[in-house]
Image (cartoon, rainbow, N blue to C red):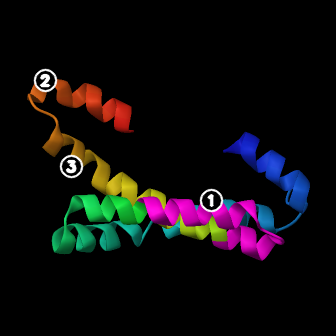
Amino acid sequence: MGHTLGLIGASFYLRTSPYNRWFVAHTLAAKIPAPYLASYLADRFGRRVALFTGSVFCIVGAIVNTFATGVGMLIGGRVILGIGTGMQATIAAPMVQELCHPVSYYSRQLQVAS
């Protein structure tokens, strides 16, 4: 995270601006409501749909970050990316446990998914 922030900061002058803290904080703050959305989608439509939705959020966030023309757009992309990664972190562990048989393979598969 720190190395990436340095590279992005050089492009958008984030190193010396007050946006430096907001850039990181919005990604982490977006992960707070994500488990609630992921659990609702998993209960309603299944874990695969919830994981797919989280992946779509990540892809959209990455595209917004790629084509960001300003700091506001960059922070918005990071919020979308934070929602996606929060949803994936919520759904991945139970889904891996559900798909891995026998149980002895579970810890190895969970390390791969993390």
Q: Which residue is mark 3?
A: 94
Quadrant that contains the C terminus: top left
| Viewer-closest of 73 and 66 | 66
Locate residue 41: give its quadrant. bottom left
Q: Main secondary structure of the magenta part?
A: helix
Can residue 26 be seen? no
Q: Is residue 94 above or below residue 80?
A: above
Magenta part of the protein: which range? 55-76
Residue at label 2? Answer: 104
| Amino acid under disc 1 | Ala
Q: Please identify, in this view, whether the residue under mark 2 or under mark 1 is nearer the observer.
A: 1
Side (left or right) of 19 relative to 25: right
Question: Is residue 62 magenta-colored?
Answer: yes
- Residue shown at 79%/68% (left/top)? 19
Label 2 vs label 3: CA separation?
15 Å
Q: Secondary structure at mark 1?
A: helix
**Residue type beneath disc 3:** Pro
Which label was assigned to residue 53?
A: none
Q: Residue at x 76, y 76 (%)?
A: 72
* Residue identifier under label 1: 62
Mark 3 neighbour density, 10 Å: few (under 14) some (14–19) many (20 or more): few
What x and y, as percent, mark residue 93?
26, 46
Q: Helix, strand or loop at disc 2?
A: helix
For badge 2, the amino acid type reads Ser
